[in-house]
Amino acid sequence: MALLAALLCVSSYISIQLPFSAVPITAQTLVINMIALLLKPRKAGITVTVWILLGLVGLPVFSGGKGGFGVLAGATGGYIIGYLVAAILISLLKGNKNKIIRNTGSVLIGIPIIYAIGVPWLKVVLNLGWPAAFTTGLLPFIAGDIIKCIASVYICKPLYRIVNAADDQVRLSAKKS
């Protein structure tokens, strides 16, 4: 969990600011998908919550190396909350199996949750109309997010066994003590 939280922090620095949008392109959605596909729902939620809390106390873990409550209350705050909801939902949808089709379906259902929370938040915070909110907070990101969804499924397929084997080892050693 800690490694995935750290990876989420690092992914925030892979950020491209679009000149027409308050929302940057980041690697965060790729990592959110990975967290959801590799961890059970509770652990996925804890991992993303730790990242959010690190950002809230001012550490520069949000997109572009930002931190603090102002980021969460700002234009991209809805996307940050959406990450938490999506990570838990994707993890629930994928279940306990590591199947390409199910994982792909899970991330393709989960990613719109981020937009469902992020776009209305963006609209309210920036006082935009719906067309402007969709044009700046949704449309430019769809193709890249589909690519990140598919990439996360194929990255996590071999990692799933390793992550869960390590988790089983921790559980076994805790029972022995």
Image (tube, rainbow, N blue to C red):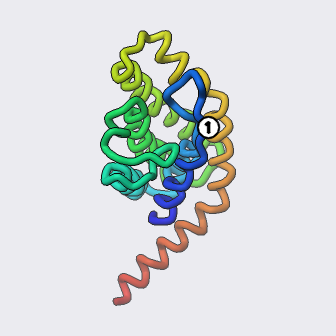
The extreme bottom residue here reads 177
Q: Left of 77 or right of it: where is 139?
A: right
Residue at (61, 37) in percent of width and height: 16
Position in image of residue 15 (x %, y %): 59, 42
Residue at (42, 10) in percent of width and height: 129
Numbered circles on residues, count: 1
Local crowd size for mark 1, using a 10 Å CA cut-off: few (<14), some (14–19), many (≥20): few
Q: Quadrant of the N terminus?
A: bottom left
Above/below status of 16 relative to 35: above
Instruction: Give the amino acid type for the residue marked by disc 1 in the picture.
Output: Ile
Front residue of 24/100: it is 24
Front residue of 100/62: it is 62
Residue 102 visible in image: no
Front residue of 45/21: it is 21
Q: Quadrant of the C terminus?
A: bottom left
Position in image of residue 39 (x %, y %): 48, 57
Position in image of residue 145 (x %, y %): 61, 35
Which residue position holds label 1? 16
Above/below status of 54 relative to 111: below
Q: Secondary structure at mark 1?
A: strand
Q: Left of 131 or right of it: where is 88?
A: left
Residue at (60, 47) in percent of width and height: 14
Residue 72 visible in image: yes
Front residue of 133/40: it is 133
Residue at (41, 36) in percent of width and height: 82
Q: Quadrant of residue 76?
A: top left
